Amino acid sequence: MLFAALFYVAGITLAGGLVYRISDYLRTPAPLKIPTTPAPTTSGGVVLRMTREVLLFESLFKGSLWTWAFAVLFHGGLALVLMRHLRYFTQPVWSWVDLAQPFGIYAGFVMAIGLVGLWGRRFLVDRIRYISTPSDHLMLALLLMIALSGLSMKFLDHTDIIGVKAFFLGLEHFDPQPLPASPLLYLHLSLVATLMIIFPFSKLLHAPGVFFSPSRNQPDNPREHRHLSSWAAKLESES
Amino acid sequence: MATEITAPPYRVIPIIPAIKPGAMEGLKPFVANDKIQEALGFPGGLVEDWKDRAIAKMGDLLKKYRSLKVYLDACVHCGACSDKCHYFIGTQDPKNMPVARQDLMRSVYRRYFTLPGKLFPKLVGARELTKEVLDEWYSYYHQCSECRRCSVFCPYGIDTAEITMAAREILDSVGYGQKYSNEIIGKVNTIGNNLGLPGPALEDTLAGLEEDVKEDTGIDVRFPLDVKGAEVLLITPSADFFAEPHIDSLIGYAKVFHAAGISWTLSSMSSEAGNFGLFIGNYEQMRKIALRIRQAALELGVKRIVVGECGHAWRVAYSFWNTLTGIGDGAEDRFALQLQKQLDQRYRQPAHICELTWDLIEKQAITLDPEANDNLIVTFHDSCNVARGSRMGEMAGGQFEIPRSIIRAAANHFVDMSDATTREKTFCCGGGGGLLTDDLMDLRVKGALPRMEALKEVADRDGVNFMATICAICKTQFSKVLPYYGFNMRMVGGVHQLVSNAIRLGDKE
């Protein structure tokens, strides 16, 4: 019951926090055209640029090959792992989730390798060590512990996944079911709930943030189309 | 400058330098006095309640600029930008890493505007805004040239320039402004250009240039001022009127207009392309300066507005003029509508002088003899604001191709510097963004290191003896710092300086 409450709180915090953040970003105007050029001149081009940025980490690739490699391992691994986990939330399980299943299991290791690599840089590279705050380390520790506790349940100490699925389906139908008793599972789920709660208050906001970055999401067409924010338009009527 | 300034040694192996904490600590350009500050509507000196006002200003900017808000939230400290700043490479001061420079403000943002920063400041690197922090802002936000190189490599496109501009805006609002930039803005507002060159002096200078060119070529090339009904209004950085090597490009523009038979004029009221309002991040000042140009265009009744060789001026003109003043399309106020009716919309408005010259070369309306520059082996330095904040021509990246095409048409020997230092990855000259002042000479010399290394490479390998550029700040900066690195100060010049040497003028006789 404690876990049921925890997950309701975490889910609401995550969803509510993100909705608040995103609507805040949406409400805040970008008064000037500041795409980092050369930039696409059309909105279609911007969609492509953003897609490359989000799926391939194009800029990071230009910036640092090591960081890019570890970032791809981590995020790619995480994406597959999340897809695989959908099986605990859907009944019947969607067919593409079944397809992701075999990859998803090993993606857990890939994700962990990526995290270790990213964390290693925070100790080994003097510049990155200099800029790292305690929360940067804790965030990586949290993610790594989530990955390791998850992998342990798969490969070391099996959990009653049928019970787990019943628990989450119960949450979805507002009919809480008991969670199978397993220390590893408790650990795993507590950490995940923690991550969900801190997401909207932390640097994890880079995930929605990238879509609102004016240097990436604006088309380069200032001569052709006038761009005027609401507060700048007020100056107009004053003169 | 009491201490002797020397250039840092070239790196034998071009690896990322180790950090040297505190290397540039306490560096501080002259603070603006009360006269300079008050002329712009800023408090004359640091106000008593600076802390509350600074936080309030920050809150205000967070509501007005999505860039600032998203950029302060999104950084994950990945470090992709950490080795990209020329000032970091040249000084090794870790606070000159873009991410660390941002964190000077981000730490304060977290403390006052985010929940974790209010609850657990130590954990997330949040800190109080103290006088020490404010001084640190003043120091390190005046060690950023707002060149945007870091934003190219950031996975979220975080542009440190936006944060530097916000910081300077906050500093101005509490009465802690920088003398160099703010004094210059005052001069544009009262006299019409950054140098404070009054109309009659400008007239004399231009008359002198006509004589010089006549003596040199035997041809009457005009340098018209305040001519109503001219086709083109040329807006160029005021350094073009008197500084070396800038003036040679001005002669180049005049020869292009002459050879193509285009009537043109300068304006004494609006004799400045540069817009330092950008550097201090102040929208109102930037707009005020831009409106002078609109006024000049309306008064002179010109059909086209063309901008001379100036990096940040072109960014403001290309990216912001339409927003600020309605040059271009879509504005609704009376003057903007009048201007749009008046301007010839078959041409790009505004146009860069390189766009105009290249169009003429392509249409064979002017002829260049590249042999005239056979004594030169030329390379091209992409200026940051042109490269990463604007465009030329129709295609993305035209800002790289068009100047190079002009150089190739004007000279037979052209070599590009290393790919890692050109086009969108170009390094700042070290003097941009309001730092082109003698009180920052040490920083300027150090910040030029990466560009000087790339130049050294082509100078040694290919015998390059001329670096062309299209920015008044780059030209001044390089003239000053080239000697520190063992180069001749005359190695730098404008693209239109090459055009000036090569253009055939006789046809119209």
Image (cartoon, grey):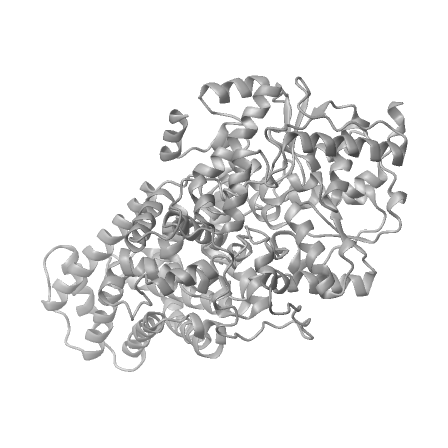
Q: Quick check: B77 left or right of B462?
A: left
Q: Position of residue B27 (x, y in %)?
A: 51, 64
Q: Is residue A41 visible?
A: no
Quarter holding residue B35: top left
Image coords of residue B346 (percent x, y): 64, 22
Residue B398 vs B429, above or below: the answer is: above
Please give left or right for residue B85 compared with residue A26 in the image: right
Q: Is residue B207 above or below residue A129?
A: above
Q: Residue furthest bottom?
A: A156
Which quadrant of the figure contains the N terminus of chain A?
bottom left
Residue drawn at (17%, 69%) of the image: A163
Residue B428 in the image, given as x and y percentages of width and height? 61, 55
Q: Determine whether B346 is above or below A60 in the image.
A: above
Q: Quadrant of the C terminus of chain A?
A: top left
Task: Relative to B161, say whether B121 is above or below.
Answer: below
Residue under the point 52% across and 45% down:
B183
Nearest the viewer among A221 and B98 is B98
**Residue for point 71% across, 29% down:** B203
Tag count in the figure? 0
Q: What percent of the width, then of the height, locates residue B103?
A: 40, 62
A200 sits left or right of B270 in the view: left
**Front residue (pair B218, A222):** B218
> Is residue A168 among the parts visible in the rendering?
yes
